[in-house]
Image (tube, grey):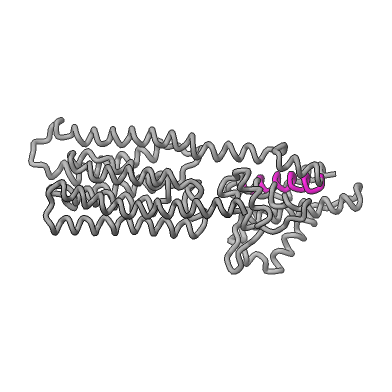
Amino acid sequence: MGSENTQSVLDKKYKLIYGAMFMLTGLTVLVFSIVMGKSYELILRNTISGFIISGTVVFMLTDAISRGKGALSYENYDKKLPFVICYFAGLILSVVLPFVPNQFWPYMALFVILSLFSNAEIGLVSGMGFLLISVMMEENGGIGELFLYVLAGAVAIAMFRDLKETTAVGYPLAISMMMQTILLVAYDVLFQNRTLSFNLMIIPVLNLMMNLTILLIFLNMFGVYVIRKTNDRYMDINDPEYSLLANLKEKDKDEYFRAIHTAYLAERVAHELGLNSRAIKTCAYYHRIGIPENKTKWKDVEPLYTENDFPVEAVEYLHEYIAPKKGSARSKEALTVQICETVIASIMLLIKQNKNATINYDDLIEGIFKKKRESGELMDYDVTFKEFDTMRKILKREKLYYDFLR
């Protein structure tokens, strides 16, 4: 009950914040349009555009939030404030930048920052919105600079949309800087009626240096405080001695060892299939964490995951596994955990019945996979026959590990 009240308060708080984003954007554009001496027609156009831009961004945000955690990148569903801060910073920049040469605008970096604190689509739309405000506020704003920064921002968002701890940022940075250079030359330098000289390139070069500096600083901070923090959390909760697992061991040793062995196999399969092995391992460890207390429904176990700050991806897999949505395809991650658990549970049951039993692991695994195929259960999963066959081969290779279950 307490968590529901807290969530309700948070929802109301962000509704007010998003309402403020909508109103302040239009009013800010209105005030600066008047201060900059725009005509009545331009003031009206700019103000209407400001409200439309902010309204679109707010709608996209609330729509993404309503669709669940997967609609926003990284942990942005749970941590919405960074985007709000960046949005207001972008709004201020959008009305200040018209006072400096447009070749010096740092919009490429802003596009990336906005997208990483929301998702690629919202980052692109909000970045384009701020850019449009800047162009409208200029004395002689043109379509060339609009295309320049939209294209550069779109390329940069594409390059940085899937950051991981192991991602090497050198290649994405090089591509983004190269595209920014080409576009600055194509849309600006070529159209200046001046002799090609070093002075002509000073501002574009400063633009590149500024964007590069901002991106390097931001990506480093984002890696430390967002990506690495999530990975560190996985290291904590995927430790067999973590408090939740330690409690499970005390209450039900069979369930504890079932979870440990399932997690081992699931991680092996995930590595070979190129899946998120840490999130899958978490799902394998904790999808039956409530069994000793007869807690099998999602509403009963969800507080355990949220109170222990489980990463977003792990919670999504656990939710899908425990309470799958009817009529929608289930993921190969869920199938991986299910098959690995079935194999471990079957072997543990046979050993419990007869500790010295001779088990033909190949036949056992073949039987499990054959049953999955013949029952038509695979139709419920987003998995190819090749991936299904790969799972079978990997599990057959683990015969030596199965002997440790005795």
Answer whether residue 65 is visible to the viewer in this image: yes
Q: How many marks?
A: 0
Q: Is residue 267 one of those drawn in magenta? A: yes
Q: Residue at x 15, y 30 (%)?
A: 198
Residue 115: percent from left, percent from top: 39, 48
Q: Left or right: 223 with respect to 290?
A: left
The spot of residue 312 in percent (x, y) is 56, 48
Q: Is residue 389 above or below residue 79?
A: below
Q: Is residue 125 left or right of residue 395?
A: left
Q: Position of residue 272 (x, y in %)?
A: 61, 47
Picture coordinates of residue 43 (x, y %)? 17, 55
Q: Is residue 242 magenta?
A: no
Residue at image coords 72%, 60%: 369
**Which residue in the rendered view is the most extreme toward the top?**
198
Give the side of residue 37 with respect to residue 108, left or right: left
Q: Residue at x 14, y 46 (%)?
A: 36
Pick the residue in front: 130 or 362: 130
Quadrant of image for the C terminus: top right
- Give the residues in magenta: 253-270
